[in-house]
Image (cartoon, rainbow, N blue to C red):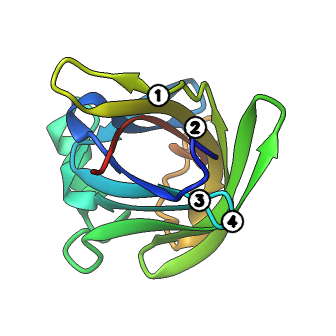
Amino acid sequence: MTTATNAPTRWTIDTSHSSVGFSVRHMMITNVRGEFKKFAGEVVLDPQDPSVNATVEIGSIHTREEQRDAHLRSADFFDAEKYPTMTFTSKRVARTGDGYDVVGDLTIRDQTREVVLKVEDVTGETADPWGNTRIGASAKTKIRRSEFGITWNALLELGGAMVGDEVTINIEVSLVKQK
């Protein structure tokens, strides 16, 4: 992850033009999608040691169904009162064809697991109308919620589980270069 110069540059996430979303199988029928409305992060593009750090506010979860959102914030799932944030801290970045693998620690409910963010669609630097320099990227990973202590479920009458264990995380970021 480098820019036009070899000097390290700092970029912050423009949250009004970015998203942190997820999808999970519901009742073994369809994928339910949601997002977190509040998050922050920084990317340091350094040829020697690139890094990514991000924090997501659990209480900002939004799935278009308030009752479900309240349940997801409860101790059955995220326990947002006790664990108000989830974090990602990169450990290493590797170029992979047209993208990058960003390996790092994802912490949810005080459980930390190594994950790989597959970063694609990295745009070149672009000047915006307000005098800022921007880049964009898309990232994706899959996790097992049970590995983070999120194990609530209900068995369905005809077999299977109410909520799948595998969660797909999709991230779209617009990054603004810090001056």
Mark 4 and 1 residues: CB-CB less than 8 Å, in contact?
A: no
Residue count near mark 2 (Cα–Cα under 10 Å), binned few <14, some 14–19, many ≥20: few
Mark 3 and 4 residues: CB-CB less than 8 Å, in contact?
A: yes
SS of the residue under disc 3: loop
Mark 2 and 1 residues: CB-CB less than 8 Å, in contact?
A: yes
Q: Earlier in the sequence, mark 4 or mark 1?
A: 4
Q: Residue at horizontal 54%, vertical 70%?
A: 148
SS of the residue under disc 2: loop
Q: Classify 53 as above or below 65.
A: below
Horizontal and vertical percent for residue 4? Answer: 57, 37
Q: Report, in whole angstroms, how far the alpha carbon at label 2 lies from the one at label 3.
A: 11 Å
Looking at the rendered structure, the kind of residue marked 4 is: Gln
The residue beneath circle 3 is 46
Asked whether, in this view, residue 127 is left or right of residue 31, the answer is left
Q: Report, in whole angstroms, how far the alpha carbon at label 3 lies from the one at label 4.
A: 5 Å
Horizontal and vertical percent for residue 97? Answer: 84, 32
The residue beneath circle 2 is 4
Toward the viewer: 166 or 99? Answer: 99
Q: Residue at horizontal 54%, vertical 41%?
A: 156
Horizontal and vertical percent for residue 43? Answer: 46, 55
Asked whether, in this view, residue 162 is left or right of residue 41, the answer is right
Q: In this view of the protein, can residue 159 be seen by the observer?
A: no
Asked whether, in this view, residue 166 is left or right of residue 13, the answer is right
Which is in the foreground here, disc 2 or disc 3?
Answer: 2
The residue beneath circle 1 is 125
Looking at the rendered structure, the kind of residue marked 2 is: Ala
Q: Residue at horizontal 25%, vertical 80%?
A: 82
The residue beneath circle 4 is 48
Mark 2 and 3 residues: CB-CB less than 8 Å, in contact?
A: no
